[in-house]
Amino acid sequence: MKKLVLFLAMMTLFFTTTSIADAHPGRLDKNGGHNCSEKSKAKGLCTGYHYHNGNGGGGSSSGGQSNYTQPTTAIQAPALTKVAVYLNNVKQSYTPSAYMKNGTTLVPMKPIFEALGATVSYDSATKKVTATKNSKKIVIGVGNKTAYVDDNGTTSTISLSHPAEVYQGTTMVPLRFVSQALGAEVTFDEAKLTVYITTK
């Protein structure tokens, strides 16, 4: 009789252990869980990724199971490369400073155009900048790559290599546009990251 009781106890322990192993196959990851095996899915024991320690991994849990979401890493915008500006051999200080973006040197339009003798105004309703010098009027819209010129009744356009943009509240335009619009001589020393603007 004792042998029969002992045998039944051993068989019960064996089947219980097997059931537990089938319900939770595989190794646990660092979050305390793992993906449900096909065998366990067929038995209805689990449906996907689940934890073995309740709310493991900091996620919510219902019946020991939880959907696991990988953390996302914020992508930071690349830093702009600052460029020094010299006007008639005098170093200028602008806020914001000139910078390189996508291979194009962008400079602050208002202070440079005003230093070259132009009057500059901005229309917030149309997002257009107007520069006037003597009989010449230049209009460029933010986000546009075409500037419109009216020189004493003669109209023309200037194509920009990069659209005018607003950075820190200032309209930035390609360096070459300064030469095209007002006739100043411009050069860029890429090795020194320095712009030289000379009035003719």
Image (spheres, grey):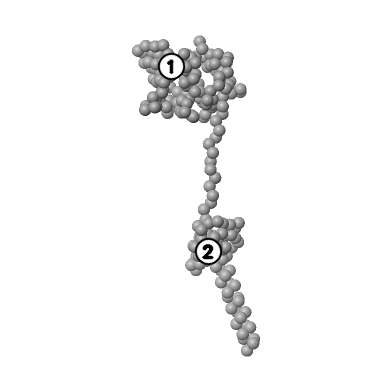
Q: Are marks 1 and 2 in contact (CB under 8 Å)?
A: no
Give the secondary structure at mark 1.
Answer: strand
Within 10 Å of the Cα at label 1, are there few (<14), some (14-19), or many (20+) other Cα atoms?
some
Q: Quadrant of the N terminus?
A: bottom right
Q: Kindly give the residue lying farthest to the bottom in the view shown.
A: 1
Label 1 to label 2, Cα distance in Å?
71 Å
- Whether residue 166 is visible: yes
> Which quadrant holds residue 81?
top right
Q: At 53% across and 23% down in the image, what residue appears? A: 94
> Which quadrant holds residue 34?
bottom right
Mark toward the start of the polypeptide (1 vs 2): 2
Q: At 56% across and 68% down in the image, what residue appears? A: 22
Residue type highlighted by circle 1: Thr
- So how many labels did they put on this image? 2
Between 133 and 19, the residue placed more toward the observer is: 133
Residue type highlighted by circle 2: Gly
Q: At 59% across and 78% down in the image, what residue appears? A: 12
Per the rendering, the mark at residue 119 is: 1
Per the rendering, the mark at residue 64 is: 2
Q: Kindly give the residue lying farthest to the left in the view shown.
A: 153
Of tags 1 and 2, the one toward the viewer is: 1
Residue 16: percent from the left, percent from the top? 58, 74
